[in-house]
Image (tube, rainbow, N blue to C red):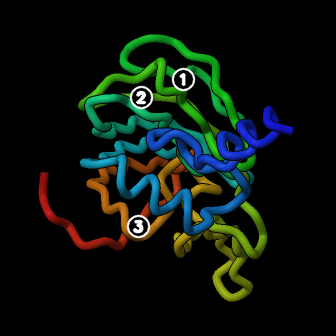
Amino acid sequence: MRALALILPLAALPAAAGAPPALEPGVPLAPAQWRAKHYRDVRYALDLKLSRLNASGRLRVTVTLPRRPVDLVLDWRGGAIRGLEVNGRPLPAEVREQHLVVPAGALKGGRNPLSLAFEAPVAVSGAALTRHADREDGAEYVHSLFVPADASSVFPCLDQPDLKARFLLEAMDALERTVKIRARWAGR
């Protein structure tokens, strides 16, 4: 009976302070608060190529981590990820519960650049990237609506509104249609 009394208090302790909360689909409050506490100075550079049925591209992300690095958990609900590099070294992509997880062992305190190639579908409705055929002019359009929690269906990111980031976007259309981007421009 005495051994049981010693084990129970240890089991009741919370996870280590630097460990992320358990992963689950979406962006629940506890993981979002944990990321906001541990991640700083987020920057994205996104090269996006649009086609009729999908988007593909190359993503470069830089995130500043605490002196003792923690896992980097990006939201990801899209397709394939290839060619992941973290701090200049190749790393197998680990996707769990709609998240791309980069283990703390591959990271360092301070700035951590990562790059990867990705693919995401273009849907006919109900998605962040949607295809629409206009009956009047006969043209086909692809448009985006990145409401909170939808950007991660197009590219891996920290899809929560309290983690602001600088963003560079280059978009190209595979069918040579016009690409229009509406955003507030802050300069380089």
| Dot 1 and dot 2 residues touching (CB under 8 Å) | yes
- Any mark on residue 84, and which? 1
Element assignment for label 1: strand
Q: Which residue shows up at 26% across the image and 30% down it?
A: 67
Q: Residue pushed farthest right?
A: 1
Q: Residue pushed farthest top?
A: 89
Disc 3: CA contacts within 10 A as few (<14), some (14-19) or many (>=20): few
Q: Position of residue 148 (x, y in %)?
A: 53, 72
Residue 54, visible in the rendered structure: no
Q: Which residue shows up at 74% across the image and 85% down it?
A: 135
Residue bearing the label numbered 3: 180
What's under tag 2, amino acid-wise? Leu
Seen from the viewer's position, the closer of residues 143 and 39 is 39
Q: Is residue 109 above or below residue 75?
A: above
Residue bearing the label numbered 2: 114
Select label 1 or label 3 by which is in front. Answer: 1
